[in-house]
Each structure stands twice: as structure tokens, then as C-alpha cells.
Amino acid sequence: MTTVAGPDVPRLLGLTGPGAWAMAGLFWMTHIILVTLSGGAPMRTIEGWIAFVLTLVAAVVVVLPGRYPLRWPLVVAILGVVAFSTVAIIWNLSPTGWPGWTSWSFGSNTFLLFMLALRGRAWWGAMGVLLMMALTVHWSWATTGDVWHGVDLTYRQLATYFAGTFFALWLRRTARQIFEFQEADRRRVRDEQVRETTAAERARELHRVSLIAGPALAEIAAGGRSAAARKQHALIEAQLRDSIRGRSLADDGELTEALRAARSAGASVAVLDDLPRDGSVAVDSHFIAAARAWVADRLAQQRANEVTVRLTASAGQPVVTFATADGDASTFSAADTPRAASDPRG
């Protein structure tokens, strides 16, 4: 059964590629300016700079091409960056007053968690926001005994995240609809190609049949019903039957002439193609050409009145069997082709 791949949501939404890299570059530039001009006390510590570097790296990671939803190791890494940067920054803030841009980690972490939502991990992004809030509330309670200061610092991030996540989920739905439309269009194009190919094949077959049977039909319509004409008509009927029942072996060359000669001499020859129709057995043109020549040579040598030529598969390889009514049977396989026989590796 063929498995149809799902939509490449990051590509459809532009979450990876040039636009996403530009967004990551803007994130870097903005936060470098913020930290340089307004980093404050947290950026006078080593942990503050570690948090800053990890945040910049995480901003690149979330726009890298990859599987949708985002892989678990990356999700865990992003949550780890959020937790570490939150602790590293808030524990170096003044516990009173409004921190301003020195609390830059709240905004950067919300961006990272929003990107998690866009990359198919909305619930984990929500857990990251709650973790950030919990750590901030714990810091506020531990330093001032007031939990509401921590809530006041972070509730806006919670509202921003859930508003953005609603947007992300809606975009995901839109991406899936776009994918379904694209798949429907691809199926339509494939169906049209199949119809065109089938129509072209049918036209070729009709043309071939008209070349073979057209003169005979015209002769019958004109009243040509002599014994000689009926014999020729029977040969033409047999040739058309070969093209249907022995499709892979049928040709308009040496084998057809040999079949006509054998049937003209009174032999009954059946040509059968019993290969699987699912394409599981590969048959190349070199083998078919050699098999046709072999069958033509056998027909020229045989004296039996009934002959069956059958193309089948054995051990996944095509094999032609030439059998007569008196019990004589011989086979021709890929190993018997001139190319295989002359191959020094064989």
C-alpha cells in the first residue's frame, strides 16, 4: 500500500528558508541592541551572557529545516533554554519596581515558545510559558514574599503566547487545506496524463490493427470469401490474437513471419504472455529480442502440429517455454541471451 506523505507545514508556512532566516536575523539584531543598551545587572554576570548566547542559538534552531512536528530532543532543548534564561535573568533583577528591558528574557522566551507552537508543539510551548511564570512567581515570592509581582511581570507573556498559538493552529489548518488542494491538483494532472497516455496507446493499437486487418476487412466487404482468402483471414486473426494474448512477444518482424509460416503449413500455434501484470518481473528489450529470435528458430525446426509458446516468470526472471503436443519442451531464459553468455562475470 502506498503511503502518502503529510503536508510539509514549515515549508508551506515559510517557517524555514530565507524569510525565516531574515526573522532570526532580526531577532538577533533586536536582542543584541537591547542587551547592549539596556542589559542592566543581569548582563554583568556570566550566567546572563550564557543565557543570551543560548537564546540566540535557540532562535536559529527553531527555523532550521526539519521534521514536523519538531523533534523531541529540540523541544526539550528549547524548554531548557527557556528555564535557564528565566532563572539567570530574574535572579539578578531588582525584586521591586518595573525592570524594563533588563527583563528581555521574557520576550525572547515567548518568541521561542511561539515558534514551538508553529512547529507543531503548541502544548509543550504552553507548558514552557507556565514554567516561565512559575519560576518568576517563585523568585518574586522568595525575594519579597509577594507572588503578584511575578504574575504582573509574566501574565502578558501568557496572553501573548495563547493569542499567537491560536494564530499558529489556524495557520496549521490553512497549511493542511493548501496541501489537500495541491494533492488534488497533482492527482488531477496524473489522471489527465494517464488518460492521455491511454488514449495515445489506444490510437496506436487501432492504427496497428487497421494496418493488419484493414485490407482483409475491405476484401471481406467486397465479397472476397474464397478458400485462399479465408486462410489468409485466419492467419490475420491469429496475428491479432498473438498481440493480445502474447503481448510481450508479439512483433511485426521475424517472429511474426515465422508464426505465419508455421500456421500456413498447418500448425496450431498459441502464443501466451503469463507474466505478472504488476511489473514485479522486469523484462528488458535485449531479452525479448533474443527470445523472439529463439522462438522463430524453433518454429522453423519443429514438425509438430500443435505448439504452445509461453512467457512466464521463474524465480523472478522471465522464461520462455516452447512446448509441443508430443511432449517436447525447451526453455529460454536471460542466461541464454548472447550478452549473458559472453559476459565473463557469468
Image: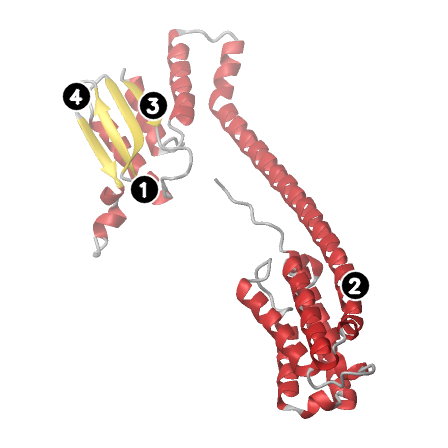
Q: Is residue 342 left or right of residue 44?
A: left
Secondary structure beneath disc 2? helix
Q: Mark 2 = which residue?
A: 159
Crowd rating for badge 4 (residues with CA inside 10 Å; few <14, some 14–19, many 20+)? few
Amino acid residing under circle 2: Ala
Q: Which mark is residue 327?
A: 4
Q: Mark 3 = which residue?
A: 260
Secondary structure beneath disc 4? loop
Amino acid residing under circle 1: Phe
Q: CA distance from mark 4 to mark 3?
A: 23 Å
> Can residue 188 be seen?
yes
Q: CA distance from mark 2 to mark 4?
A: 88 Å
Secondary structure beneath disc 3? helix
- Of the residues under marks 2 and 3, which one precedes in the sequence? 2
Secondary structure beneath disc 1? helix
Residue at screen point 83% across, 83% down: 97
- Of the residues under marks 1 and 2, which one precedes in the sequence? 2
Q: Position of residue 216 (x, y in %)?
A: 48, 16
Amino acid residing under circle 3: Arg
Residue at screen point 77% across, 70% down: 151
Disc number lying in front (4 or 3): 4
- Of the residues under marks 1 and 4, which one precedes in the sequence? 1
Contact (Cβ within 8 Å) of mark 2 with mark 4: no
- Of the residues under marks 3 and 1, which one precedes in the sequence? 3
Contact (Cβ within 8 Å) of mark 4 with mark 3: no
Q: Position of residue 185 (x, y in %)?
A: 67, 43
The quarter of the displayed image where residue 162 is located: bottom right
